[in-house]
Amino acid sequence: MIKIVVLSDLHIVPAGALSHGLDTTERLETGIDFVNSRHADADLIVLAGDLADHGETAAYLRLQETISRFLVSPVLTLGNHDNSDRFVAQFGAERVNQQTGKIDSVIDTNGHRVIVLDTSVPGQPGGRLQEAQLQWLKQSLEAAEGRPVIIIMHHNLTPFGVPTDSIILENGEAFAEIARSCGSLRHVIGGHVHMSVSGSMMGVPFCTIAGGHYNIEPRLGKPTPTHGTEVVPRREGPGQLAVVLSDEKATVVHMENYIDRHLVMAPDLFQK
Ligand SMILES: [Fe+2]
């Protein structure tokens, strides 16, 4: 059995600043307290990109200080809001995968293989996996040798029928082609869209978590000429992470809200 906690879209800003009116560091601290109290037994914690809101050095410094409070040291990768050079300058060149040149990792633990992919492309909001990354992914999946595999990356691999469809993973089909060749792939977990979605593409099962930043209210009408340009309502919550529980037979992904404005129902409402 393995337990993995995935957080995404932290959007940390330098001290004294807010992101769209939100104190994202305070939100992350709430998430860390939640994880440390409820999931101190996690085998792995992954922060799946958009670590900083604008990729400033001061934001990475603040992130580094803040996440030092996790009881389990997290594995990090990048999203479209990150700046790879400044991230590496702050967190160290050892975070760079020698084969791909990106912030890609593979973690073998508890009978599982977890692959963390960096889908960021400098200067653009959409994501892409470089050719070297696709090759490395293929090799990493083959080397799993039948062990359950979980992939974590920032961008979503297929359109969701929402305005952010223009900034998804550009080569999601190439990714899915490789991913589905692995007979033991269990799930692909992402962030980026700031909403909770699950589905499959070309037989590859995936989900996205709402993450730590604002939440986007999806408008799921059929595409119109203004699709992708309209302003949709944004909500200040939930702050949401994923808890993955997986063993030899099954993989389950729980979406847990560490910032939640819903009321807790009184226990006596459930008495017979
Ligand atoms: Fe984000």
Image (cartoon, grey):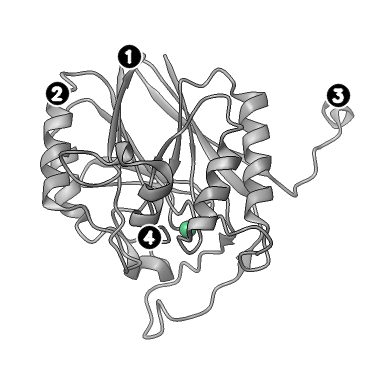
Residue beneath the point at 65% across and 57% down: 15
Residue beneath the point at 40% across and 67% down: 164
Mark 3 or mark 1, whichever is nearer to me: 1
Residue beneath the point at 66% across and 33% down: 34
Mark 2 or mark 1, whichever is nearer to me: 2
Disc on the earlier residue, 2 or 4? 4
Q: Distance between the Cα atoms at labels 1 and 4?
A: 34 Å
Q: Is residue 43 left or right of residue 131?
A: right
Disc on the earlier residue, 2 or 3? 2
Q: Distance between the Cα atoms at labels 2 and 4?
A: 29 Å
Does the residue tagged 1 have its C-beta within 8 Å of any atom of ligand 1? no
Tell me the number on the disc at residue 248.
Answer: 1
Asked which quadrant contains residue 19, the reply is bottom right
User: Would you name the residue on which mark 4 appears?
Assistant: 80
Tell me the number on the disc at residue 54.
Answer: none
User: Would you name the residue on which mark 2 appears?
Assistant: 143
The type of residue carrying mark 1 is Glu
Disc on the earlier residue, 3 or 4? 4
Residue beneath the point at 58% across and 41% down: 65
Does the residue tagged 4 have its C-beta within 8 Å of any atom of ligand 1? yes
Q: In the rendered structure, are the residues bearing label 2 and label 4 in contact, judged by CB atoms less than 8 Å apart?
A: no
User: Would you name the residue on which mark 3 appears?
Assistant: 271
Indicate the position of residue 126 as horizontal and vertical percent values. 31, 64
Disc on the earlier residue, 2 or 1? 2
Of residues 182 and 74, the one drawn nearer to the viewer in this rendering? 74
